[in-house]
Image (cartoon, rainbow, N blue to C red):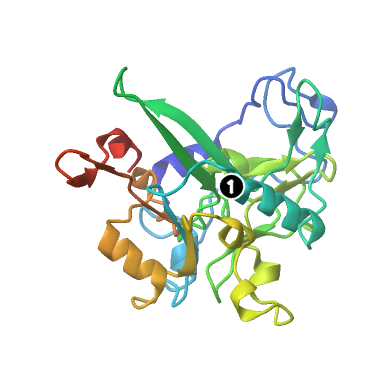
Amino acid sequence: MIQWLKDLMGASLPLPAGEGWGEGGGGGSGAIAMKAGVPSPQPSPRGRGSHASVRAEQGETLAKQLALVIDLNVCVGCHACVTSCKQWNTSGSAGPLADEQPYGANPTGTFFNRVQTYEAGAFPGTDTIHFPKSCLHCEDPPCVPVCPTGASYKRKEDGIVLVDYDKCIGCKYCAWACPYGARELDEERQVMTKCTLCVDRIYDEKLPKEDRKPACVKACPTGARLFGDVKDPNSEVSIAIRERGGYSLMPEWETSPANQYLPRRVTDIAGGASKIDPKLGGLS
């Protein structure tokens, strides 16, 4: 098991400012107050060597791994992926997803998909970058071994990481373990939620075949989101990764994210040349 995960699982985990759970809230010692009778998570006995246990348990690698490939070159930050995800998962098996005062001064809610928009570079050469983020369905997901009830798990048949809401106690250990911030607590149901790759949609034989893809992929107006099996070398996603230089987010965490990103390219209008945008070099 990688050392940072060992340290996390053996530590008393402080709550973020302003967050509380149960009667203990965020006061006192600052540690997460576990429900009575629920054991604190311990390092998984399934680990092997320096890596976490999930990959070892499933025979090192899966034969099939469904994932998203996001093209940062054509994402325009329209948030169609965010709203379509919210709509589908609120009406589908994952919902309803909580919204607390959505039109108030401090709106909160549960989202599986978010788009971060920021500026890079120095004036006058600044650029606006849109960066969609959701669960990356890692091959070695750190959120799985830390779960004290076994609610977090990775499917062997397609590699999708899911949460069993019947087992989840909302302790937030998975959120602390995830280095990508992909887990959110549904305040109304007190369970942890995340992107499911629309697992209830992609296998629904009642839908036309062309609609059996995640809602975000279907809704994207620029085709910035691709979906498929990254273990199939002939799939659309594998070809895009291979030909366009796809990369993983924060590979130093050794989680082997299944989702990949295609880098932005900038074009020299005068010369017509295209090259990788150096402003995104720190994200790979």
Q: Position of residue 167 (x, y in %)?
A: 77, 57
Q: Amino acid at mark 1?
A: Gln
Judged from this view, the residue extending furthest toward the left is: 271
Quarter of the view holding residue 163: bottom right
- Going 61% across and 31% down the picture, which residue do you hit? 13
The one of 224 and 11 positioned closer to us in this rendering: 224
Q: Is residue 147 left or right of residue 34?
A: left
Q: Position of residue 161 (x, y in %)?
A: 58, 60
Q: Say if residue 67 shows up in the picture.
A: yes
> What residue is pinned by disc 1?
42
Q: Is residue 176 above or below residue 200?
A: above
- Going 41% across and 26% down the picture, which residue do you hit? 119
The one of 34 and 115 positioned closer to us in this rendering: 115
Q: Say if residue 60 shows up in the picture.
A: no
Q: Position of residue 105 (x, y in %)?
A: 78, 20
Q: Position of residue 239 (x, y in %)?
A: 33, 69
Q: Is residue 250 left or right of residue 157?
A: left
